[in-house]
Image (cartoon, grey):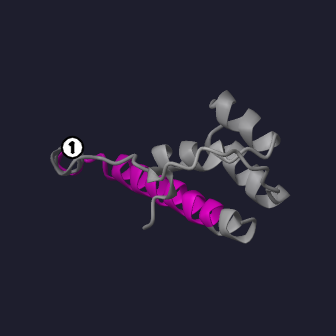
């Protein structure tokens, strides 16, 4: 997936975030105050925060240990979290591209 943050253009642009998107981000990142504030202000940095947040993952070793210990639900929850966060970044990218 494209990472648009590698460029040198540092201009900040206002982005109109749909209410549904805002609610999903606020729910997923309920304790990330900087992200929430940037989202409310329509800041582009939201994408950076979401990009950083989507790198959440469990190591293969930890997955194996968790399954052996019967913690399959923990592995499932972590996988679902990673998918949600990746999807939020994809959705942000679509919004961003529409606002170019």
Give the position of the C terminus as an image quadrant. bottom right
The residue sitting at 81% across, 41% down in the picture is 40
Q: Characterize the local packing of mark 1: few (<14), some (14-19) or many (20 or more) Cα atoms within 10 angstroms.
A: few
- Residue shown at 66%/30% (left/top)? 34
- Is residue 36 depicted above or below 21 in this figure? above
**Residue 39 appears left or right of 60:** right
Q: Main secondary structure of the magenta part?
A: helix
Q: Position of residue 26 (x, y in %)?
A: 71, 43
Q: Which residue lies furthest to the front in this view?
A: 8
Q: Where is residue 62 in the image (x, y as percent from the top left)?
A: 21, 43
Q: Position of residue 68 (x, y in %)?
A: 17, 48
Residue at point 56%, 42% (across, down): 49
14, 26: nearer the viewer? 14
27 with respect to 76 (left or right): right
Residue corresponding to mark 1:
62
Q: Where residue 75 appears, x then y in whole percent?
A: 34, 51
What is the magenta range?
67-93
Displayed quadrant of residue 69: top left
Q: Is mark 1 on a helix, strand or loop?
A: helix
Residue 35 relative to residue 41: left or right: left
Q: Does the magenta stretch include residue 90?
A: yes
Image quadrant holding the N terminus, namely bottom left
Figure check: 35 above or below 21: above
Which residue occupies 23% across, 50% down?
63
Along the line of sight, which residue is nearer the eye, 96 or 50?
96
Judge by depth and name the residue closer to the eye, 100 or 52.
100
65 vs 32, left or right, is left
């Amino acid at each position: 997936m494209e990472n648009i943050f590698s460029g040198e253009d540092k201009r900040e642009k206002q982005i109109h975030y749909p209410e549904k998107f805002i609610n999903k981000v606020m729910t997923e990142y309920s304790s990330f105050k900087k992200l929430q504030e940037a989202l409310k202000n329509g800041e582009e940095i939201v994408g950076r925060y979401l990009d950083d947040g989507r790198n959440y993952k469990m190591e293969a070793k930890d997955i194996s240990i968790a399954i052996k210990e019967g913690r399959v639900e923990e592995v499932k929850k972590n996988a679902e979290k990673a998918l949600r966060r990746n999807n939020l970044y994809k959705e942000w990218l679509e919004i961003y591209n529409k606002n170019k």
